[in-house]
């Protein structure tokens, strides 16, 4: 569902929807204290909601989003009906640090709202998204809920095919090129068992990431996790 116009957070006119106990996702333009608004998406349920700002507005044509939107600066997650959920908006999926950070916040389900057009090579666009989504689900041991726009607008064709990908990389359910309602079950018990058995996320070396970004070399660790020296 998309909202049109610029809204302040959290008290915009559809706040009643975000306070609902029924899970819902809302895409909208959010007011900011800066020169431009944010491209935003809210996920809500159980009376709670979190708003994610798009972190990487698309800088190239035909989008040129930095001319219309500010960049977000944080990844947020929230608990919805027992599942930890986070939103990764469109182009942010092409910056691997963002879904990884979302998973590091504890997210078990990534909500991925997208407005992807067919462009000049529809097969390539769809194939690259398929690889991205399945790789993310496998690597981060999470469910990926891909929500792509469908239909046409100003001569552009949005190819749809929204889907849910499981932590094994398999597509659980998928829509076609037109509007459609999908339903599936997310097995959180099995997902959590997988993460416990193969703790890829828990063993992530944040110190290596931080030092790498600062141009430093991380110190090796022994099996107990303490720094060792030679």
Image (tube, grey):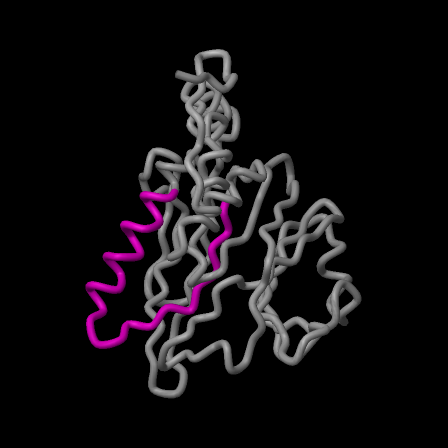
Q: Position of residue 6 (x, y in %)?
A: 67, 78
Left or right: 123, with 3 as reference point: left
Q: Quadrant of the N terminus?
A: bottom right
Q: Does the magenta stretch include residue 149?
A: no
Residue 148 in which image quadrant: bottom left
Q: Is 114 covered by the magenta stretch? A: yes
Q: Which of 86 and 44 is in front in this view?
A: 86
Q: In this view, does 29 lie to the left or right of 120?
A: right
Relative height, residue 161 to residue 214 (above, below): below
- For the point 44% across and 32% down, which residue is it? 218
In the displayed structure image, the side of residue 86 where residue 48 appears, left or right: right
Q: Along the line of sight, which residue is nearer the eye, 33 or 154?
A: 33
For this orientation, the residue located farthest to the bottom is 154
Residue 41, relative to residue 46: is it above or below?
below
From the viewer's perspective, is 222 left or right of 176?
right
Which corner quadrant holds the C terminus? top left
**Residue lying farthest front?**
230
For the image, the number of numbered tags is 0
Above or below, 70 against 54 in this view is: below
As drawn, the residue found furthest toward the right would be 11
Give the residue at x 48% y 69%: 57
Please provide percent x and percent y for residue 73. 59, 59
Q: Which residue is painted at 73% across and 53% down in the image?
A: 20
Tell which of 197 and 45 is nearer to you: 197
Q: Position of residue 100 (x, y in %)?
A: 46, 43
Q: Position of residue 30 (x, y in %)?
A: 66, 71
Q: Vertical placement of 31 versus 153: above or below?
A: above
Give the residues in magenta: 110-136
Looking at the image, which residue sits at the far top?
Answer: 224
């Amino acid at each position: 569902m998309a909202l049109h116009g610029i809204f302040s957070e959290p008290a915009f006119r559809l706040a009643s929807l975000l306070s609902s106990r029924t899970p819902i996702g809302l895409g909208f333009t959010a007011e900011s204290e800066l020169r431009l608004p944010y491209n935003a998406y809210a996920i809500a349920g159980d009376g709670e909601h979190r708003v994610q700002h798009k972190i990487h507005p698309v800088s190239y044509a035909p989008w040129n989003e930095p001319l219309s939107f500010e960049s977000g600066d944080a990844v947020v997650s929230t608990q919805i009906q027992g599942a930890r959920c986070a939103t990764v908006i469109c182009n942010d999926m092409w910056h691997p640090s963002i879904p990884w950070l979302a998973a590091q916040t504890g997210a078990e389900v990534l909500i991925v709202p997208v407005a992807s057009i067919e462009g000049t090579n529809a097969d390539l666009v769809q194939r690259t998204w398929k690889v991205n989504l399945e790789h993310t689900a496998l690597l981060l041991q999470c469910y990926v809920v891909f929500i792509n726009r469908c239909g046409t607008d100003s001569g552009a064709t949005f190819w749809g095919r929204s889907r849910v990908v499981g932590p094994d990389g398999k597509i659980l359910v998928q829509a076609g090129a037109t509007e459609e309602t999908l339903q599936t079950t997310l097995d959180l018990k099995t997902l959590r068992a997988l993460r416990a058995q193969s703790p890829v996320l828990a063993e992530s070396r944040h110190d290596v990431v931080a030092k790498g970004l600062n141009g430093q070399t991380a110190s090796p660790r022994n099996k107990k996790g303490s720094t060792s020296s030679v």
